[in-house]
Each structure stands twice: as C-alpha cells, then as structure tokens.
Amino acid sequence: MRAVVLTAFGGPEVLSIQEVPLPVPGPEEVRIRVWATALNRADLLEREGRYPPPGNRPAYQIPGLEVSGVVDQIGERVSLFAPGDRVMALLSGQGYAEYVVATERMVMPVPDQMKLEHAAAIPEAYLTAFDALYEQGSAYPSAGVLIHAGASGVGTAAIQLAKQGNMSVITTVGSDEKVKRVRALGADCVVNYRESSFVSVVQEWTHHQGVSVVLDFVGQQYFEDNLRCLSPDGTMVLIGTLSGSRASIDLGLVLARRLRIQGTALRSRPSERKVALVQRFLREAWPLFQSQAIHPVVDRVYRLDKIQEAHRYMASNHNIGKIVIHIYSQEV
C-alpha cells in the first residue's frame, strides 16, 4: 500500500510516498481502507522531529492522527463493526496511508448523509475540543469560555460544541475573514488579536467578571494574560505551545483566584483513557452530527501526492477549519 513515511526530519520536502506492507488487524482491531485523513499541528511537529509517536518507534513512521474510510477486515473479537461499514477513527499515528488498523473502541460510525471527506475532519479536532471543554475544563451551561485560535480545526469544533452546551463564547482570530466565519459558527464575541487586546475585550464583555474556561494553543505569549481573563475558580486548559513552552507567571494571581492550570494531549494518553473519551463522545456529541446541529469545517482538500503543499499551507496559518487529504478517489 502507499503511505507517507518519515525517513528524515525537516521541512515538507521530507514527506515522501512509499510502498509499505499492508497492516494486519489484531483480535480487537479493525482494518480501514482509508478514504481521507486530515492534518493537525502535531503532524508538522512530528515531521520536524519534535513530536515522536508514543511507545516504541514503529517500523515505518507514518504521521496522521485521524482517518475516515470503510472497514476492510476485522479481528476475531470485534463485535461493533463489520466489513463495509463507513467509519472514522482516532489514531496515535499511521493515518497518511491507504490502510490503517485501529482499536475497535476508538472507531466511530460516520453519521448518515455525511461525506467521508468531512468525517475525516472530526476525530482529532472534535475529541480534543470535547475533552478540553468537559473533561479538563469542567465547562457547564451558562459558563463563559475564551477559545483562542477560533478559526483552527479545534477552534471551530470547540465553538460549536460550546454553543450546543449553552455556553457564552469569546474567541480570538487573526483576520477579518476569520472574524466573519467564526461569528457564523455562533461565537458571541470575536477579537481580531492583530487589532485589539483580548484581555481588555474579555474584561469589558464579562463586566470584569472573567470567563470560567480558557482554551489556549499559544502558550508562552498568552499565558499570564489568560490567567487574568479567568474568573475565580476558573480553569485554563493548555492544548498547545505555538509561541513557546516556557512562561513566567504571577503565582499570587493563581492563589488569590484559586485558578487551575490543566495541560492536555490526546496522543500520549493511555489507551484506556482514550477509549473512555471516545465512548463518552459517542454518547453525548455524536448525535449532534447525526442531527446536523454541528458540522466539521473543511477549508481545503488535497490529494495524497500534494501532501507537501498541504503542510506548507497549514504552516501559513491561513486555513479556516481543517485541511483534508484524499487517499481514495471514489466515495462509498
């Protein structure tokens, strides 16, 4: 089968398509003929050698944390899926390939009427957003939530999930076009961070009460300002560190307001905890896709042989929503 294999680390030019052996599913795994995968910031870090896959290094290091496709083969103890089922899956890697194997309980059915290319944009982004809001952030109806990078894949997911949870959403983006797009998704207040201070806007918007939860991808540059945006007993959930991983903070602020700082990462999480998250997501969030109350936001679709171009586009930070990579060319 064809797959994108990392044999060196560096820029997009190290991404090359090679022939690799077809994976064989274990007793509790399904093999998926991949229709599409989607890019994540983690893929860029892995390509640069800064985000290795968990556990022992695989024989072929293939990036890709999510896929959609059709079940091709099942292990002997699999009971939830059968060959021919349309599915999407959360992975720890290997998604840039024509076939993948996945643990049965981290596989999800594709909602009726949804195209497979759109389903590929769900697992990593929506599970990350769902986990950050509910598992890590303990968000609740009527809570105020500050979501940075609102036009990103996780950002667009978090805005929709928060609004469906009856939360008030303020988000930050970097262009007027992104302002319009995230407002259309339901954001109550949008800050173009190139033009305004998000701290002052949050304070004005909340009448100086602050928000209950902050979802942050930026890290160093925003760290202390995020804490200043939180209400007493609020939680900052750190999802990424795009501006750097070291920060100086006022610990007195944390103590006085009883703030909580929570880091999160799906890829390195123990399998049993990822399975528990996927199963909760299926119960509470999957019906929202089925009813079309929420939907994945897809910016562009590339063929697999354009994977280098897709990585360059993601690095430019111009995308609104997810960047999808087609593996097969016939819908099923």
Image (cartoon, rainbow, N blue to C red):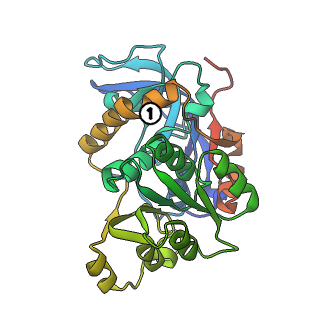
Residue 206 visible, this angle: yes
Few, some or many C-alpha atoms within 10 Å of disc 1 (few <14, some 14-19, many ≥20)?
A: many
Q: Image height check: is 52 above or below 95?
A: below
Mark 1 = which residue? 89
Residue in view at x 65 percent, y 20 percent = 331
Front residue of this view, candidates 53 and 137: 137
Q: Image height check: is 266 above or below 290?
A: below
Residue in view at x 51 percent, y 59 percent = 147
Residue 111 percent coordinates (x, y): 51, 23
Residue in view at x 62 percent, y 56 percent = 14
How many numbered discs? 1
Q: Image height check: is 54 above or below 126?
A: below
At label 1, which amino acid type do we have? Ala
Residue 59 visible, this angle: no
Task: Give the side of residue 32 with respect to residue 309, left or right.
Answer: left
Residue in view at x 65 percent, y 55 percent = 314
Residue 113 percent coordinates (x, y): 59, 19
Looking at the image, the residue that sits furthest to the front is 207
- Quadrant of the image occupied by residue 104: top left
Residue 1 percent coordinates (x, y): 55, 30
Residue 112 percent coordinates (x, y): 54, 19
Q: In which quarter of the image is the C terminus?
A: top right
Q: Is mark 1 on a helix, strand or loop?
A: strand
Front residue of this view, candidates 293 and 153: 293
